[in-house]
Amino acid sequence: MERLFQILAQSIKAVKAFKLRTFFCLISVALGISSITIIVAATEGAYKRALEIVSRFGHDSLLVLSGGDEARALGVRQKSLTLDDVEAVKHAFPSAYLVVPMASMRDVDMSYRDRKHRSRVIGSTSDYSHAWTWPVMQGSDFTEADVRGLRNVGIIGQYLSKRLFGDENPVGRHILVRGIPVQIVGVLSERGTSAGGENLDDRIILPISTVMRKMQNETKYITAFRVRFLDYENLYDRAEELRLFLRERHGIREHDPDTFRIVSPKEIIGFLVSLTGSLVIFLGITGLMSLIVAGFVLANLFLLSVKERTAEIGIRRASGAKKRDILIQFLGESVIITTAGGLLGFIAGVLSSRLLMLIAEFPIHFSWKAFAVGMVLSLVVGIIFGLQPAMRAANLKPIEAIRT
């Protein structure tokens, strides 16, 4: 064991002595490891974000959107869902304990005194906050009496509250929404961003009757409705039953596409995984290429080092050093450099990921897995690409080495 420590001490001295070789090997390994680190962290972050969003979306919930996939791809706003559909679903599905309609409008002008802002307007029933498990933190929700009476009352998100009211309490205040005075009765708790990056806190919720009649001049069509089931373990069976039910109600023929879209927790996870996939592929190829290049750089620099240190190797062999001692020393130098490069690469990955989160708001989550993968790959590169130079050094004949 003492002999091994002496050999490793020689390796550390050599790493310090050949500074230029060490520098180039460190940088090349660090570049590859930083990319791999970001990949692992991005993958973990995406799955963590997916689980968070699914938790907020509701494991017992489905969201039915107006307009099929073909219409959305063409940018056509297809009106297909109605208030009658909502009532029909309530009667047809006994396990659906909440069926909440929504009418949505984007980029609606609203103002409070001299402050103006464009935000999203959602028309819904008094069950909106329950349907989305989104509690009202200040004030109260509007009531079914407000919906029946087409009253101008609403609850707002945290971001919209800050934009219009700053630190002022918005409850009881009036704002203008498309020129219509609306009294704020409540403020929703903070929600964050959706899977698609939309700021969920930048919105106002009004009675659906108010939005449809006074803003959309509409009495029939809605944007979407949300369903929550008691038997959530059969959620995907219920989703298929709901799809077939709506197809039959809308008179859609067998080979024609759906005129609506059903979103479930599975679709949300799939969306985030596909979003992460492009980054993982790009960084994966870049990272592996960088590691391979780093390995070849290390191997070539070590082969040059063996040639330069031939006399040193010969003297050591003549002084009693065995082949395995020389092999362990050179492999030790290689592994020490790549391990240090792995640590440097992990730190660089953490710092660069912060920049990625700031620019693209991409979900990144570092854990022991990212660190472990980086360190294991560093060791593998050090052993694989350092083995040939180490064997060449070990196989040098003492007498010929000293002569050289």
Image (cartoon, rainbow, N blue to C red):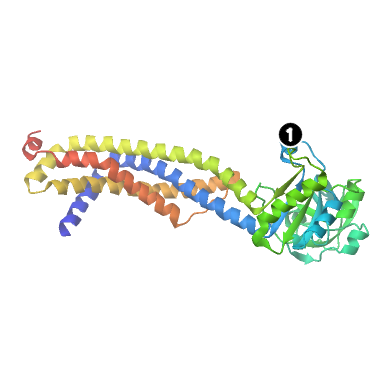
- The picture places residue 81, in percent across and down from the top left corner, at 82, 47
Q: Residue at x 66, y 47 (%)?
A: 197
- The picture places residue 96, in percent across and down from the top left corner, at 75, 61
- 175 to 169, vertically: above or below: above
Q: Residue furthest front?
A: 254
Instruction: Give the total of numbered labels.
Output: 1
Q: Name the amino acid, label 1.
A: Leu
Q: Is residue 200 visible?
A: no
Q: Is residue 344 left or right of residue 197?
A: left
Q: Residue at x 18, y 46 (%)?
A: 327
In the rendered image, the quadrant that contains the C terminus is top left
Q: Residue at x 82, y 48 (%)?
A: 249
Mark 1 Cα-neighbour bin, 10 Å: few <14, some 14–19, many ≥20 = few
Q: Is residue 198 visible?
A: yes
Query: Mark 1 falls on what kind of element?
Result: loop
- The picture places residue 393, in percent across and down from the top left corner, at 17, 40
Q: Residue furthest right?
A: 149
- The picture places residue 398, in percent across and down from the top left corner, at 8, 40
In the rendered image, the quadrant that contains the N terminus is bottom left
Q: Quadrant of residue 228?
A: bottom right
Residue annotated with mark 1: 74
Residue in the foreground of this view, choosing between 154 and 207: 207
